[in-house]
Image (spheres, coloured by chain):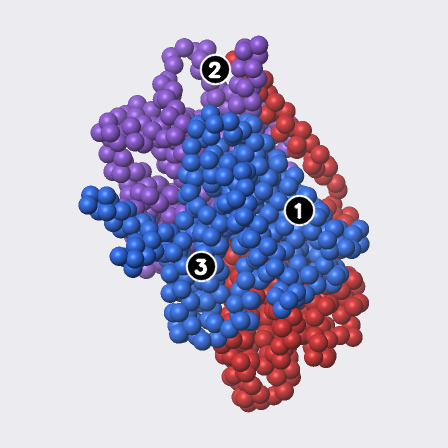
Chain colours: A purple, B red, C blue
Amino acid sequence: MAGKSGRSINNVPESSIKRMIFSWEGILILIFIAVNIFCAMFSEFYNVSSLLRQMPVYLAEVFLMLPMAYILVLGEIDISVGSIVCLSATVCCIVCNMNAPFIVVVLTGLLVGTACGAVNGFILTKFTELPPMIVTLATQIIFRGIAEITLGSGGSITMSNLDGFNAIGGKVGQVPYILFLVVILAVVFAIILGKSTFGRRVYAIGTNRLTAYYSGVHVQKIRMIIYTVMGTVSGLCAIFLLSSSFGANTTTGNGFEMDAIAMAVFGGISSTGGKGNIAGGVIAAFIIVCLRVGLGQQNVHAQVILLIIGVLLIAAVALPNIIGQVRRAVKTK
Amino acid sequence: MNKKVISALLCGAMVLGAATPVLAEGAGDGQKIALVGKSAGNAFFEIAAASFKETVEAEGGKVEVVYPETATADAQIKVLDNLISQDFDAICIAANDVNALQAKLTEAMDAGIKVSSFDSAPNKDSRQVFVNQAGTVAVGQALMDAVLDIAGGEGQFAILSATSQAANQNAWINAMKKIMEEDDKYSKMELVEVAYGDDEPQKSTDQTAALLQNYPDLKVICAPTTVGIAAAAKYLQDNESACKLTGLGLPSEMLEYTGDDDAHSCPYFYLWDMQGLGKLSAYTTMSLVKGDITGALDESFTAGDLGDFTITEADDGGTEIVLGEPLQFTPENIEEYAELY
Amino acid sequence: MEKKSFIKKLTGSREALLAAVLLVLFIVVTIINPSFLTVKSLMDMLKNNAVTMVMALGMLCVMLVGGIDISIMSTLALSGMSIGMLLKNDVIASTPLAFLIAIAIGICCGLAVGLVISRADVPPIIATMGFMYVFRAMGYLVSNGGQWAGAAALGDFKKFATTKFLGINCVIWVVILCYAFFFWFMKWTRTGRMIYAVGSNPSAAQVSGINVKNIKLLVYVIMGLLSGLGGALQVSVYASAMPDMQYGGEMDVIAACVIGGVSMSGGRGSVLGALLGSLILATIAKALPLIPFFDQLWLNTIKGVIILVVVVMNVVLQRIADKNALKGREM
């Protein structure tokens, strides 16, 4: 899809402060502030400590948004991540129950995730004609299916040794460890995407795959790396999810892919490829988290919350486009 | 460029606009109890929730019925996080998974919130007491007797369950298997297969058709799940199959299919008193908050006009309160119950 | 000579390959369990997959212009739930009226999706993801806090799915009529050809005087219409309306199209392909419970593997076909 429109690379960061404020990220920060003011007025329980306490569960999903942003910039999509989370969480629990040291459990989780991601990457790079959506749809069913088989008829597993998971679920003061990790990873992913050659190449592929290929970019190698990393991060997500659920079941991670994609897209990362950056995605992720916590604290019906997020998602992409069209129309007059 | 700022403000305004109508009213006096469902849009749960709410409000308390986004434990964890942030006295939950809620429910109990559960229980460490709709063995016995009766004492039967992971269904199926082994009168019954329809009408229909194709002599299908029994009843009735059906279902869903003659696929089926379940759960939760009970074995309390109840040991080693025997719905009484649920 | 060109034609056409795959599936399943290949069993299969099959046609149109729609099952739930509640509360009783209302609701949903995509240039996956949440939530709101419309509440409406006309169930007639109409529509009408034109090359289509925006709007309206129809069929076939019906089912429809050779980047795909794709999926769903070797736990994994194998095989065979075509040119 991306190749056809022949869009130019227009994401070169501008240094001017004015530009920064009026960029999509600037607007997102305004929305973030607005959402927080709104939530604080809406819910008497909404404050920094309740937010920090409730955040870890959501932050596990923010992990997924980071590599998902790369995949979206490529102009592709990965809908198997929720199932990868499920499979690695399941295997983690099994290994943990074999009395393995915690580090082994963590490595297993990451390894399973990486392997699943590599499977996606392998199929997609071997059969480049296949659309990523359909391949990851098939692997979504398969990975969750394997988890179902592993879990057996109980469909649920709990861990016997919780020490390690309690440790990573810990806090410095009120700030959970996972928040630090999210920030660190976000910075790393942002620098690689925004400043490195690798990142430039990702944008190049997303903007025009064929041109990128002819100018010497190893398109398939880069895709393979990104899908594999997506798997690794899904494994990481699984480990942190376990620190708040102490067990896995067949529905673990269900729908995470959509949450991750929604965060990225709301953050201005175009699903048609070549556009957007991590900073926008991270701010958008926190907007969604704050909104969910704030509305949830007043027990707003879950479907109404989803409705609001759906409207926000459409509006976030539609409004700038409509305004642009109106401006152009006015100019030509 | 200013237009972009306007767009941002518009977004913010829209959020405000969309959310204001659902602003919750201020907290009242008395107990504040949260009732957590498995997922939104479950008629089965709604009936119990309505009667739960009524009972608590009659005592001057306040109930907030909350649903997770999807029928998963992950989503329920987020709901529980939200509830712990608020000032609830108690949480009564129908758990989507046995184990996954342990961390959050323990956190809630540590924060002084009483935790009871009904319909489907979280594990014994994550609750104070479970209100069981009907004893597992009693349900298994009722279903097994129904199968024996409908089959006429001998022949093949199959079970159409929800998912292979559904804890309630698995417990009932295991109870049925055990009863069948232990008593000689079931020796001529043969359980040919346990099929899973995932609680989707489409898949349940496929599974029912496959059962009939694989076992032409099948006499009875037992579906201990409300979606499965309705889908199977429709398939059997539309195809005028000689195979009959029983299980656990909602009277309003099964009204069309229940009858003694050949034109109906289901002679009779079971469920429990959903309103009673809501009521008993409400009284149990309120007693926990008042401190009348702690959820320990052999404690007893009075549940309004339902009478006295004693806490007994549950199959998983925790404690439970059993509502009573399953209710039988026959062609005679189904119309009356179909009005209710 | 003639024979060779026939083989060439066979390997060169996606549809022929798919038909072969379907045939192999049929043969294998029948060998394992002969009861699969009976008229009744096949009719059951068609009736039970009618919703997916009808909606695959809409998805075909959407994918032909390079779009995608993941909001369809929410539209289905909204329209199905709406008529379910109308019938339950005795507001309407007539079956045709119920179908019309469901279709009208579907068209409105499709119009909203289409306008956002064609006029505000929102990428289809994002727009439909948003609407997926919005319509599903509206379905819940219509259900008035989780009420169901069971068989007894639906009155005569559910009889539509049990009535037979010329020995074939009415639901299957709907599927046949839809496919016949779309076969004609996509192949022989100007609008149908315009959809292909827009999908193959939007700029060229624009230059040659096609209103690309309106065509894009049209395909989502068609998709909405068929989703509304799907909602009515779903309620009728299963005699029950629930707000969470077909949750996640959009992926089956998309998979049916992709297996049927419809390209996700637009311009390629046919009605026959969509038919074969959805039939392959329907066969898998129908056949898996009939095969005694597998534990029930394995069903999902096997379904996933089959989808993967079919799409990969499609690519491999296509590559061979392309190679053969090149060989011909060299000579």
Marker disc for residue A21: 2
Residue at 78 percent of width and 68 percent of height: B335
Residue at screen point 45% across, 43% down: A257
Question: Percent position (x, y) of residue B307?
Answer: 76, 67
Task: Pick whichever of labels 1 and 3 is earlier in the sequence.
Answer: 1
Q: Are marks 3 and 2 on the same chain?
A: no
Chain letter for the residue marked with disc 1 in the picture: C
- Pointers 1 and 3 in contact (C-beta within 8 Å): no
- Mark 1: secondary structure: helix
Mark 1 = which residue? C103
Tag 2 secondary structure: helix
Q: Chain of mark 2?
A: A
The disc labelled 3 sits on which kind of residue? Ile
Tell me the amino acid under the disc marked 2.
Ile
| Left or right for A56, reference B42 | left
Q: Is residue C84 above or below residue A271?
A: below
User: Is label 1 on the same chain as label 2?
Assistant: no
Q: Give the x, y percent position of residue C110.
A: 60, 39
Read off the residue under disc 3.
Answer: C280
Q: CA distance from mark 1 to mark 3?
A: 27 Å
Q: Amino acid at mark 1?
A: Ile
- Image location (x, y in percent) of residue C201: 42, 32
Classify residue B139 by image quadrant.
bottom right
Answer whether labels 3 and 2 touch (C-beta < 8 Å): no
What is the quadrant of residue A272 in the picture? top left
Q: Chain of mark 3?
A: C
Image check: B277 left or right of A216?
A: right
